[in-house]
Image (cartoon, grey):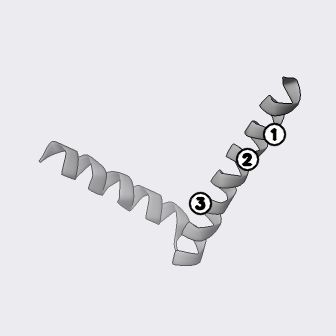
């Protein structure tokens, strides 16, 4: 029950920050871009 409550609160906070479905898509896309950039940086350091 606690996990469901925490998950629900996290989702509400996430969606409130985005305001729209397209905002969610942009947030996910920018998160993916950040991971990709970090991966490229680590690869170039090797």
Is 12 displayed left or right of 38 in the figure?
left
Q: Nearer the viewer, residue 11 or 29?
A: 29
Q: Nearer the viewer, residue 39 or 5?
A: 39
Say if mark 3 contacts mark 2, CB within 8 Å.
Answer: no
Which of marks 2 and 3 precedes in the sequence?
Answer: 3
Q: Nearer the viewer, residue 45 or 17?
A: 45
Say if mark 1 contacts mark 3, CB within 8 Å.
Answer: no
- Dot 2 alpha-carbon crowd within 10 angstroms: few under 14, some 14 to 19, many 20 or more: few
Is 1 displayed left or right of 27 in the figure?
left
Q: Secondary structure at mark 3?
A: helix
Instruction: Give the answer, above or below, for where 30 lies relative to 44.
Output: below
Is 7 displayed left or right of 36 in the figure?
left
Where residue 17 appears, x then y in whole percent?
52, 61
Q: Which residue is mark 3?
A: 28
Where residue 22 appears, x then y in whole percent?
59, 76
Q: CA distance from mark 3 to mark 2?
A: 12 Å
Where residue 26 appears, x then y in whole percent?
64, 67
Q: From the viewer's perspective, is the residue at label 1 or at label 3 nearer?
A: 1
Q: Secondary structure at mark 2?
A: helix
Which of marks 3 and 1 precedes in the sequence?
Answer: 3
Q: CA distance from mark 2 to mark 1?
A: 6 Å
Q: Secondary structure at mark 1?
A: helix
Say if mark 2 contacts mark 1, CB within 8 Å.
Answer: yes
Q: From the viewer's perspective, is the residue at label 3 or at label 2 nearer?
A: 2
- Dot 3 alpha-carbon crowd within 10 angstroms: few under 14, some 14 to 19, many 20 or more: few
Residue at position x 37%, y 58% in the image: 11
Residue at position x 59%, y 60% in the image: 28
Instruction: Give the answer, above or below, for where 36 lies relative to 19.
Output: above
Q: CA distance from mark 1 to mark 3?
A: 18 Å
Q: Which residue is mark 1?
A: 40
Residue at position x 74%, y 38% in the image: 39
Q: Which residue is mark 2?
A: 36
């Amino acid at each position: 029950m606690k996990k469901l409550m925490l998950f629900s609160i996290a989702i509400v906070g996430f969606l409130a920050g985005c305001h729209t479905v397209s905002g969610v898509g942009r947030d996910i896309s920018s998160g993916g871009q950040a991971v990709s950039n970090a991966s490229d940086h680590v690869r170039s350091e090797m």
